[in-house]
Amino acid sequence: AEEFGGPGSYILDTVREVASSGGKDYVEYLYEITTALGKKLNRKLYVLEAKTVHFSKLCEICKSAKHAVLKPCKVYYMVFYCSMDHANQDSVRHNKFCQEYLFSRKCGHLRETEGIPVPGSMPFSISRASEYKAISGSTMKDYATPTFEPEIDACLSEFVSYSLSLLYGLEHIDLKGGTKVYELRKLTVLMLDAYNCEFGSMVHCTTWEYLLHLLPKLRKINIILNEPNKKILEGNAYGVFDIDLCSDCLSKKCKINITIIKDYYSYKNSTIFRKPDVIYNHAHEDKKPFFVDDKDDYLPYPEPDVPLILLGSDKITMLHCVRWMRKKEMLGVCLPMQVNPFRGMRPTKLHTNVSENDSCLHYINQYILVMQKSSYRGIEIQDIACCHYIQV
């Protein structure tokens, strides 16, 4: 304001005055001012600064250019009204917007900071296990103690759910060589169709570290996120990330590596290939639990001898997936479909595509089941008819 007008004046007021007298296009003046400010500061404008320049101080109701007589909203400071009457007219929409804006800010801050799990900043506190104890019959609350506000707890519980649900499923599987989950020193997990499911946010998620906390012998975790229809890294076939760990995990020389791939079969022929110990997937609405290639063809199950842990939010979709896997891949049911005890601490409110008012409460990982080739278990695997639902 001091650069383009007198002290205390508004930048956009100056822009309008110049534009009205000189006849230049309003957008052109905005561009000139933004460029001039950037040169003056010797840097690009921050987002907040750019918004100040590009969004005028107008009444939300009448769009009057008069200076607002009300103070700006304490939540979303760029909302103004020229009178109390207009403020009251917009109160319902504005209050709703404030709540959504606050929540988005909290989630944005969470995603920016969760990748640095220094002591005290882990989103949930999970006690470390001196010796492994089966988590069967336990619930999320037995392992995760919320440390944030309720809205953030609901969001974070989904992240924690994937780690604990994986461990819960591993308890019902005989891994390669008959190894049990509590004997594992290294674990490789293939997550199918990562970005088309809810798995997409798990790339930098530190909650994988909880597996190291709960499995004392485990030293290395390899997470392979398969996403064939999304350009993860331009010009690169693979994206590899390391997760920063807490001091206790580092002292034990633990490591978590996440690899993003576009095509599993190309990855299988690469020099960085690691055969998965387990395949982790989320039931799709199209009823086929497989990833697709660029031609939208359904590919074969990538590793027939590798067990599958399937999560889902809908019973019918889960059941269709089980039937498909039994028919096409001859997998048997190790853990019958049931309500997932590690589905999350609180349900998430989702809006449908029809209307913002049409919403429902649900857990993304509401149900879980485990399947495996019958030849890899010493006991007879239960038939699909034995699958049952545990009522909530």
Image (tube, helix red, strand yellow):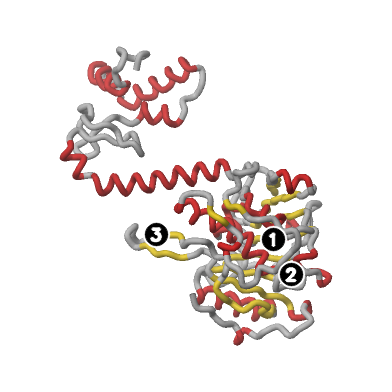
**Quadrant containing the N terminus in the rendered view:** top left
Q: CA distance from mark 3 to mark 1?
A: 30 Å
- Across and down, in percent, residue 167 comes to 67, 64
Whether label 2 touches label 1, CB < 8 Å: yes
Q: Is residue 392 shown above or below 74?
A: below
Kindly identify the amino acid type of the residue bearing the numbered disc 2: Val
SS for callout 2: loop
* Circle number at residue 306: 2
**Would residue 47 appear left or right of 320 to someone viewing this image?**
left
- Numbered label tally: 3
Whether label 2 touches label 3, CB < 8 Å: no
Q: Residues within 10 Å of mark 3 (few under 14, many from 20)?
A: few
At 63% from the left and 62% from the top, the residue drawn is: 164
* Circle number at residue 351: 3
At 73% from the left and 60% from the top, the residue drawn is: 215
**Would residue 70 appear left or right of 313 to someone viewing this image?**
left
Q: In the picture, residue 291 is in which quadrant?
A: bottom right
Whether residue 234 is visible, yes or no, is no
Q: Residues within 10 Å of mark 1 (few under 14, many from 20)?
A: many
Whether label 3 touches label 1, CB < 8 Å: no
Per the image, the residue denoted by label 1 is: 190
At 68% from the left and 80% from the top, the residue drawn is: 332
